[in-house]
Amino acid sequence: SSLFARPKGYGVDLIAARRSDGMEKLPPWPSARRPLLANTLPEERLPVLSKTVKVSGQDIEAWNDDLFGSLRRKHGIPDDFLNSDGEQSVSFQRSRLETSFGKGGENQYASSDSRFIVKAVSSVDHASMLQHAEAYVERLLHGETLLVPIYVHFRDADSKKVYIAMRNLAPETLGWYEKYDLKGCDDDKTLWWKGKLIPPVRRRYYRADMWCRCMWTPQRWHYYEGKVRARAFELELPPGERDELVQAIEGDADWLTAQGLMDYSLFVAFRLRKD
């Protein structure tokens, strides 16, 4: 909410001052309201052909791999983590089921061992990665954080398509029962319910058939009920574990706000164990 809080001195009082004083333009925004992306990108914006990392047997061009390499080393991730099965290490012919949840429309792909996700990124997300890479890696190396680890930021040497590769927090091989995407607002959603994906059926301004609930399909109702369920989500934890989790979430939220970033979620997944 702090990202959208109206700074003191703005709003009705300022509009009234403009009307009475003939003010021509608004004063500058406070520094806390700086643009989400800087007007200029870092100078080192061209990728370098990686000498150590390959993806499915193919050469890649990587950005800031000295930074992301230090994160791989800390987490014990070998440089061939996306090349352990050769050409079959990442199947770019088949995207993950969860791709449908991304509003940006970029595809996601799983590694053959399900431990990693390779995600295509838009030009805006790519620019944000360049801008925040150093601070992000520093946070993961030295902070108590729940941020998902990203291990390489690269583009295909031939197609020039840009990707990131990150840890898969809920590998498909483990059989998950419930998955949630929680933002603390009306955009909360249930991703998986009773071991099955809930395909998104979103209400859009251009979908006249979605304006009235009397016209909703069973699939739309299933998706909507999942959103209501996620909004009411509660998880009981022992006091010590709860405090530790809340502290980590608060620390990450403060860091993301300080970086001028928004639209992040808490990913929660459950699986049933025989014991």
Image (tube, rainbow, N blue to C red):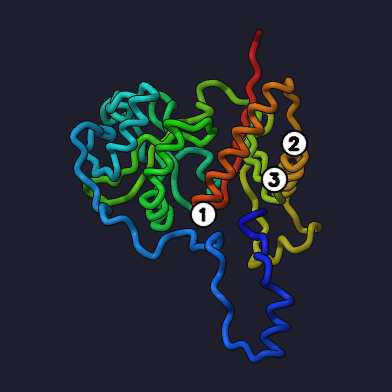
Badge 1 is on which residue? 260
Give the residue displayed 70% in from the left and 84% down from the top: 17
Q: Position of residue 133 (x, y in %)?
A: 38, 45
Q: Quadrant of residue 28?
A: bottom right
User: Where is residue 41 shown, x and y percent of the image?
Assistant: 34, 59
> Looking at the picture, does residue 14 appear above or below residue 174?
below
Name the residue carrying label 2: 233
Q: Are marks 3 and 2 in contact (CB under 8 Å)?
A: no
Q: Give the residue at mark 3.
A: 184
Mark sitting earlier along the chain (2/1) = 2
Spatial distance from mark 3 to mark 2, Cα to Cα? 10 Å
Q: Residue furthest top?
A: 275
Identified by mark 1, the residue type is Gly
Label 2 secondary element: loop
Residue at 28 percent of width and 35 percent of height: 55
Taking the spot 33% from the left edge, 49% from the top edge, the residue there is 162
Q: Quadrant of residue 15?
A: bottom right
Looking at the image, is 103 positioned above or below residue 56?
below
**Nearest to N terminus: mark 3 or mark 2:** 3
Task: Name the quadrant of the C terminus.
Answer: top right
Q: Give the Cα distance between marks 3 and 1.
A: 19 Å
Which element carries disc 3, helix, strand or loop?
loop
User: From what the image shows, is residue 131 above or below residue 206?
Assistant: above
